[in-house]
Image: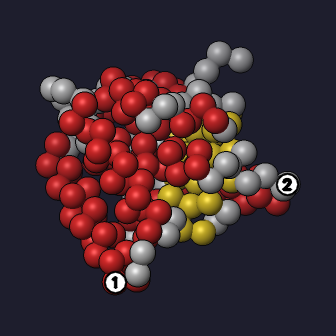
Amino acid sequence: MPRRQSEAAYESVLRRLVSLSRFGSKPGLARINKLLELLGNPHRSFRTILVAGTNGKGSTAAMLAKILAGAGSRTGSYFSPSIFSFRERIQVGGKWISKKDFAARAKEIFSILPRISGDPPTFFEVMTAMALEHFARENVDYAVLEAGLGGRYDATNAVEPVLSVITSIGLEHTEVLGGTTAKIAREKAGILRAG
């Protein structure tokens, strides 16, 4: 695809992605699970590490990805929120997803959205599915995922992590997660698995 077409495709999917933010943040894993099922469950083709917390989760996820890469593993990383570009959220080997691949993953997911009736996936759920699909296509060994909001009902919690990490916890998003540190900790602990 010529560069101008690639740039146009990227800009087009960005506009459509941003339009999904009108659905806001909605608790629950049903939408992301359905989306991943329709994609063929890409998240089952690699091991995941899930990081939640109030402060330090992005840094922790980045350090874990570097450690895994240093040990010779092909590693994907998913961060939220973005600082410079939506592309920085999805990385393989520390490199942002290309505009061409970003557009391709988004178009793939947009093509299956009509098959999800009723409650449409949110922006974050679509971005998470894009990341997991990209990691599967890139044959990563591990993906380190930074949870977006809370943990228990966060889209990233659709995976079955081999390791769950919870960084420091403080009062945040109290209108969604609860008004006490204990209630927020309970939501974050939703990423933990037996054993």
Residue most toward the front?
1
Q: Please indicate whether residue 107 sits to the left or right of residue 99 in the image.
A: left
Q: Residue at x 34, y 83 (%)?
A: 4
Point 31% across, 29% down: residue: 31
Residue beneath disc 1: 4
Q: Earlier in the sequence, mark 1 or mark 2?
A: 1
Q: Residue at 59% across / 45% down in the picture?
A: 136
- Image quadrant assignment for residue 184: top left
Residue 167: quarter of image: top right
The quadrant in which residue 29 appears is: top left
Is residue 53 shown to the viewer in this render? Answer: no
Q: Which residue is mark 2?
A: 71
The three-letter amino acid code for the residue at tag 2 is Ala
- Which element carries disc 1, helix, strand or loop? helix
Image height of 23 relative to 6, above or below: above
State the mark number for residue 109: none
Residues packed near mark 1 inside 10 Å, few (<14), some (14 to 19) or many (20 plus): few
Residue 133 visible somewhere in the drawing: yes
Please tell me whether residue 56 is drawn above or below residue 117 in the rendered image.
below
Residue 63 vertical placement versus 109 (above, below): below
Q: Disc 1 marks which amino acid?
A: Arg
- Provide residue 180's location: percent of width, then percent of height: 36, 31
Q: Nearer the viewer, residue 169 or 125?
A: 125
Say what secondary structure mark 2 lies in. Answer: loop
Q: CA distance from mark 1 to mark 2?
A: 38 Å
